[in-house]
Image (cartoon, rainbow, N blue to C red):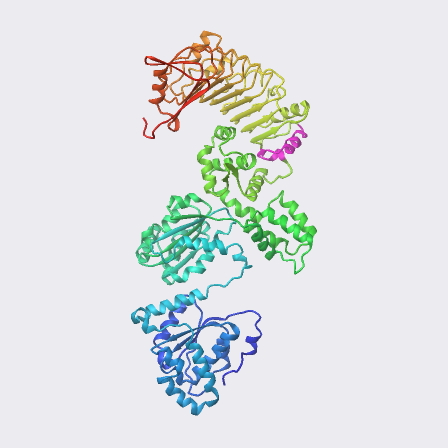
Amino acid sequence: MASSSLSPSAMAYSSQLWKYHVFLSFRGEDTRKTFVDHLYTALVQQGIYTYKDDETFPRGESIAPSLEKAIEESQIAVIIFSKNYADSSWCLDELVHIMKCKDMRDQIVMPIFYDVDPSEVRKQKRKYGEAFAIHELDNKTKVESWRKALLDASNLSGWEPQHIANGHESKCIKEIVDIISHRLRPITSSVDDNLIGVESRMQDLISKLQIGFGGKRMIGIWGVGGGDKTTLASSIYDEVSSRFDGCCFLKNIREESIKKNGLENMQAEILSGVLKQKLVQVGRVEEGRRMIKDRLHHRKVLIVLDDVDNLEQLEQLVGSHDWFGEGSRIIITTRDEHVLSGHRVDVIHNITLLNNDEAMKLFCKHAPQGQNPTEDYELLSKDVVSYACGLPLALRILGRFLCDKDMNEWRSALARLKEIPDANILEKLKISFDGLTPVERELFLDIACFFRGHDYKDEKMMMILDACGFHPVIGIKVLIQKALITISNKRFSMHDLVQEMAHYIVRGGHPNNPEKHSRVWKREDVLNICAMDAMENLDKIEAINYWCLRSTRESQVFLQVIANMKKLRWIDVSFGLTSTLPENFSPRELCCLIFSGGLKETQIWEGYKYLPNLRTINLDLMPNLTKTPNFDGLRNIERFMIRGCGKLIEIHPSFGHLEKLVYVVIDGCFNLQMLPPITRSKKLETLELSKCSKLFNSSRIQQKLLELPSSIAVVIADDCNSLERFGDISNCKWLWKFSLWGNNKLGPLDGDILLNTMLQGNAKDYFMSINLSNIDIWMETSVVWIDWVKTYNMQLPQNWV
């Protein structure tokens, strides 16, 4: 007999635990070998676990308890009403039990009216009426419940195959299976791990997919490691996959592609997944490309490629848009924006990390503290959330680690994390770092340690990075594309945990031994190094930035210490150079030397030093400096800057031997009298000699100084009161900035030559600037008096030659 209520096992469920996706209720003699057989096969091919009873029962028997249980354990019941469905009391008992499960267990019920009109079922007309005339005689007690079940089921939204796709059964079945697949999509709550913070982001990205608008689109999801790119892609895949002819989700492409036959295996997986076939064999990558294009170019497909890290993977797996049919969508997750732009995807979507509320929900899911959390728990939870900075990976890992710890252990763990990042978080973040070239790695570590928060075009920073051979303009672009750094309000920024990862790498496993770090940027670390034996081997240190704020003694110890930094690449010291550098200071790899303030001696070092890799020297605000170093051992200098050194008298004669100078600035050295000619510097682009009022006292010096190379682009000689004339610039075809402000003794200039030289040359960025004061400019037959401090700026057309 049919049950009047649900079985005890069903009533005991506190939450739904479905054994089957779909239960099929049908009249065997009508549809078992036709429609139902085709529907069952299509469901199974989609991976939908379907219950189909293949037994035939005599007329009048009741359904067995095992069949009742199968109904109760099915998430969806599909009822195929056919002409003879109502003949079977077995089918009608099934129907009654299904409708009870709908009411009591929220089972989804979907009717199909196969070769019958819904009104026949609803009102028991024609064949259904004839069947019930017999039931009134044989099963009078059940008739009322059967009639109600038929009425309720026939009022539900369903399908009439004869009215779908002009009666084409295969198309109708596909539509039914697609909708069932969609209904079976995992139903998640707002506190589900995979959906915290993902729901709104998912809907935003789905709108960019433009499903239903035709065309073919490739969408890239890009961002920092651990930012839930995979979770987002997976959620979208679950949401929309039922709308495509075939689907495939390829995971861990970065790892799989380096395995033997990795690309071939992934090509085979795409073909197998989309075509719903057993593993397709792919012999060679070129063969796989042809197979994907040939077999899928008429199919509407959804393919997700997760964790792509180079262009070849995209070229071999998804090629171009014409590999796939109309309406196809390709989703790609990566840490490298260049992979997406290089493949010319249609949309690049930069992931956003969790806000504080979302982060707290995710952390608390993994580190729950019951119904009444203590105040300590809430405060420490906020500390963890602050530490993670919205990175889902970090919140999950830390939550799982702390979930069984007490509050004292929480405090200890947080203190340790500030020195030693969690290994699992570090491993995930370090993937992007490991994918950099050696030069890009060094550039990233320098920015992470020294320049976070700096203007991304900061002149001194760019000077340091360029001197080290890092090619910062393109290098910074790569780091942004790799999601390791960002530019925010024109300043360098990065995720706190990414910076911690950089610091961990720099420390080399020795967090408390700064002398073993590759970079030193904290004052306390410098002091700790200075407190050690000054003869200690410090050959790990490559870069150091130091402000000396205490005694001369501190500075003297510091100078002895840096003499032992044999691998030093660059040094930037403010007020730390109180005496000359030690004789044994000779780091052969030094590229950039910056000293500012504090010098009590007349020179920064005595005699000859051989520093073959030194490309940049910057000396500022040294009131006692009277002469520069000997440049004979510094033949590769490209940039020389000296400012605010009021007692400086001479630039060493060897300066005139330098052939690689590109940039020279001498500013505020008003006692400077000797500057060697720079005629050997055929690459010189910028020459600034400002506030050097005694420099041009000698006519011989004026004559030699003003023999400018044709490469010159910027000439600035402001406030040089002794300057009386300016040389020939007619050969300076790159000149775009010319400034002689505040030179009252300067005689007339040939305006035609000046303007024609600049206008006919290759002005930088199509911009030109002339800054003059109280100077006669001769232009043809007229004399133009230039107003006091007036700048003439001319915007040139982009096609100017």
Q: Looking at this view, is 152 or 406 the one in front?
A: 152
Give the residue displayed 43% in from the left and 64% down from the top.
182
Disc tally is 0
Q: Looking at this view, is 326 or 156 the one in front?
A: 156
Residue 265's image quarter?
Answer: bottom left
Magenta-drawn segment: 514-533
Q: Looking at this view, is 303 or 286 the one in front?
A: 303
Give the residue displayed 59% in from the left and 53% down from the top.
360
User: Residue 198 location in percent, x, y?
Assistant: 50, 55
Give the residue displayed 53% in from the left and 20% down from the top.
642
Q: Seen in the image, is 525 located left or right of residue 194?
A: right
Residue 776's image quarter?
Answer: top left
Give the residue displayed 36% in from the left and 69% down from the top.
173
Residue at the extreme bottom of the image, as rendered? 137
Residue 374 inside the magenta-drawn segment: no
Residue 523 inside the magenta-drawn segment: yes
User: Residue 303 location in percent, x, y?
Assistant: 40, 56
Q: Looking at this view, is 117 or 548 the one in front?
A: 117
User: Residue 187 location in percent, x, y?
Assistant: 50, 63
User: Residue 24 location in percent, x, y?
Assistant: 42, 75
Residue at the extreme top of the image, as rendered? 699
Q: Is residue 125 above or below residue 582?
A: below
